[in-house]
Amino acid sequence: MTPALGIAGLGLRVVYNGFTALHDTTLHVAPGESFGIVGESGSGKSTVLRALCGLAPLAAGAVRLLGDGAADAGLPAPGSKGFRRRVQMVFQDPYGSLHPRQTVDRILAEPLAIHRIGDADARIAQALADVGLGHTFRYRFAHQLSGGQRQRVAIARALILEPQVLLLDEPTSALDASVQAEVLNLLEALRARRQLSFVMVSHDLAVVTHLCERLMVMHQGRTVELLASADLAAHRVQADYTRTLMAASAGFQREDPTE
């Protein structure tokens, strides 16, 4: 069974040097679901992802992979190697997340070596094929790739361990608009094919509405609202902050000087 991702306790709290970056935030992602997190810069979106994968210190709460009933007992504990294999992350910047002195082959081989998974040659070839890159990319360095190709390698690195939950930190924000659509379509196809669960952070409401079934709106490290993407698209929202975010997302409109 594909597990869900949930929060145990009263919620996740992250504190840095006395500053609370995340206030008792809770969420539940169902098996195969795509869950979005939106908000302005500094709202705590990326902190949630880092807390989920163990890259942020937790002052309260715990992350759990959840099965059904007795199935929970067989799931790996947070922070364990088994948990990290099932929960992988794709970072925002494809220029900074790949080692500049390693080939694509070395980058993809590293997680297999860490988790002691054999048959690396076949797995690397398949991972590149899954993200639309041929064997000619295998021995290139990151600086020889375009931004879209680098992000595809980053996605392949996350998927090569065959995770069940993928954390996506604005995976297309550093890419050109034409390339963004290609990467987003790739992610959606991979989710459907592998029955992955997504937790996706984005400042782009249109992207989240398109890819995610549900979403959480955040402001100053707190959850403002939980709603279905269909409700967001139809402007059926409850919080004033969500309405403000929607207005900002609509962009600048020049006033007619003749009026």
Image (tube, helix red, strand yellow):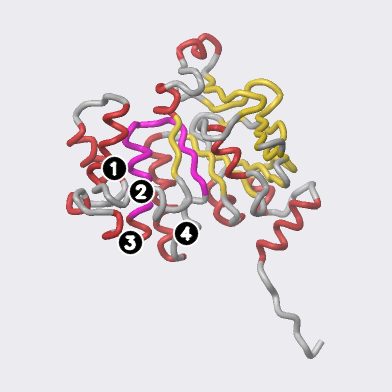
Residue 163 part of the magenta-drawn span: yes
Residue 176, position in %: x, y?
Answer: 44, 65
Q: Which residues are magenta?
A: 150-169
Task: Give the spatial CA distance, label 4 vs label 3.
Answer: 11 Å
Tell me the SS state at disc 2.
Answer: loop
Residue 2 part of the magenta-drawn span: no
Please report whichever mark, 4 or 2, sits nearer to the chain's N-terminal start: 2
Which residue lies at the image location 75% right of the left edge and 49% below the top edge? 237
State which quarter of the image contains the N terminus: top left
Judged left or right of residue 164, residue 139 is: left
Residue 75, position in %: x, y?
Answer: 47, 16
Task: Give the spatial CA distance, label 2 vs label 1.
Answer: 7 Å
Please report whichever mark, 4 or 3, sits nearer to the chain's N-terminal start: 3
Residue 227, position in %: x, y?
Answer: 69, 42
Residue 98's label in the rendered image is 2
Q: Is residue 147 placed above or below 22 in the rendered structure?
A: below
Please report whichever mark, 1 or 4, sits nearer to the chain's N-terminal start: 1
Reading the image, the residue beneath label 3 is 146
Which quadrant of the structure image shows residue 143? bottom left
Task: Give the spatial CA distance, label 4 vs label 2.
Answer: 14 Å
For badge 2, the amino acid type reads Leu
Please report whichever mark, 2 or 1, sits nearer to the chain's N-terminal start: 2
- Verify CB contact (< 8 Å) between mark 2 and mark 1: yes
Q: Is residue 81 placed above or below 165 in the rendered structure?
A: above
Residue 107's label in the rendered image is 1
Please report whichever mark, 2 or 3, sits nearer to the chain's N-terminal start: 2
Question: Of all residues shown, which one is farthest toward the front?
Answer: 17
Tell me the SS state at disc 4.
Answer: loop
Reading the image, the residue beneath label 4 is 174
